[in-house]
Amino acid sequence: MMATLKMMSREKKPMKAVMLRLRNGWPMPLALQGVFEILQSVVFCLALITLPLVAVYFSGGFLEDSFEAILQFGGLIWLLIHGVPVEILNLGPEADPSSVTGWVTLIPLGLSLLPFLFCLRAGRRIARASYTDQLWQGLLGAFVAYGAIGTGIGFLANNAHARVNIIAATFIPLIIALVGLIIGARREAGSWARLFGVDTAAYIQRISPHRRWAGSYVWHVIVAGFLGYVAAVGISGLLLAINLGVHWTDVANVSQELRPGPIGSAALTTVQLSFIPNAVFWVLSWISGGGFSIGTGSTLSTLETTVGPLPSIPMLASLPSGEMAHQWLFLLIPVAAGIVAGWYFLRVGENHLEDWFARRIPFNALSLAASTASLAVFTGIVCGLLSLIGSWLSSGSLAIGRLVEIGPNMWATAGALALQIGVGTAIGYLIAPLFETDPVLEG
């Protein structure tokens, strides 16, 4: 009995050592460690993208394409989710199909989370294997390797149906890689000081109080604007879920009419889920009044709804098709999100601009009004800039017919959100004292 237990223990030790190495990594030069970690990330991501395509291929979903073309299609999707534009060829009439081409630039943001999360994991593992002054070696190795992999995939994925620019395939994926690696390394290090070896607290102590107060004010304005925008995005996601639930019968009917089969249904569901984050930004543009488009000539907003012919995609069956009563009330939702930003700014107590106004304006009401108006303007500008980024990321083209214009009206949405969240910030900052206790007075 004891001999059997000893043998089992000896058998478990190699497996335990392998699992420990898989978790902590193998000892190697840091640059090579970065290459190894980022290579794992690419392999895992490509596998998750390609396996559904392979399943559809073996179920007969790609009758005229070879298996090599399916793998190339997976590579093109990998590049697309990194933001690389894909040119679709042979869209012209049957007599001369090569006369017309189109660009696919609409990024499925749900799938874009895959490379980001894998790069975040790689960044954590590289930071775990590095000292502070050596971290750059691992990150640089991973960064260069990711660019080389993008170049290789771009070269191998080009075919008679679609192609990408090799330079774009090399450099655009580095954006997601850089963000993921830095955030992952920061999470592992626990602070920016430990990550880069810079003592930010000591630096802040060395600067003058006035610069410190100004920096603190600017930082918390940015945080307040970010919170207001995130609150608006969160509410938009909730509204999207409610709308899909209300129109679920219409969505199910369109899905049944397509009759895609089990594997086709799984693939169609995956594609729709990958565009859910895009749809959240579209809902945000709708409630702001800026509106969004699903094809050239269509406009959907709380102020106007004009929808042209749409493809048979189940999720699109939930789009509003007419004017709803009291639809303008949705314009108040971003204002409510702005109240969150204003409330936050009062709680942190960093409104040094109000102190500056109070020393120069003898009337408290005027100084409060001036500082609150300034806060509303600055917070609105931050939200407007964030809105431009979100609208740009969630919009693009599908290269075919009217679907060359999809996504929010960027500038109208940004302007509307800047105004609405700015007004909400002022309201939140003014009403928050009615619900917050003053620790000095209470003490």
Image (cartoon, helix red, strand yellow):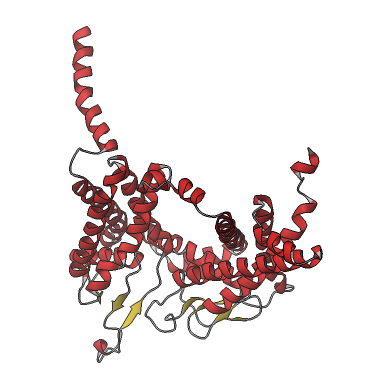
Q: Residue at x 43, y 80 (%)?
A: 403
Give whichever of 398, 387 is nearer the camera: 387
Percent across and percent down for residue 136 are 27, 51
Horizontal and vertical percent position of residue 229: 58, 62
Q: Nearer the viewer, residue 205 or 91?
A: 205
**Where does residue 354 sit, x and y in percent of width and height?**
70, 61
Q: Is residue 311 left or right of residue 246?
A: left
Residue appearing at x 24%, y 62% in the figure: 147
Relative vertical location of residue 140 with respect to residue 199 in this rendering, above or below: below
Q: Quarter of the image containing the C terminus?
A: top right
Left or right, 68 with reference to 384: left
Question: Depth check: 140 or 266 in front?
Answer: 140
What residue is drawn where x is 30% and y is 84%?
101
Q: How many marks?
A: 0
In which quadrant of the rendered view does residue 231 lie? bottom right
Vertical relation: 244 (above or below) 326: above
In percent of width and height, residue 369 lies at 75, 67
> Measured along the vertical axis of the image, is residue 3 above or below residue 358?
above
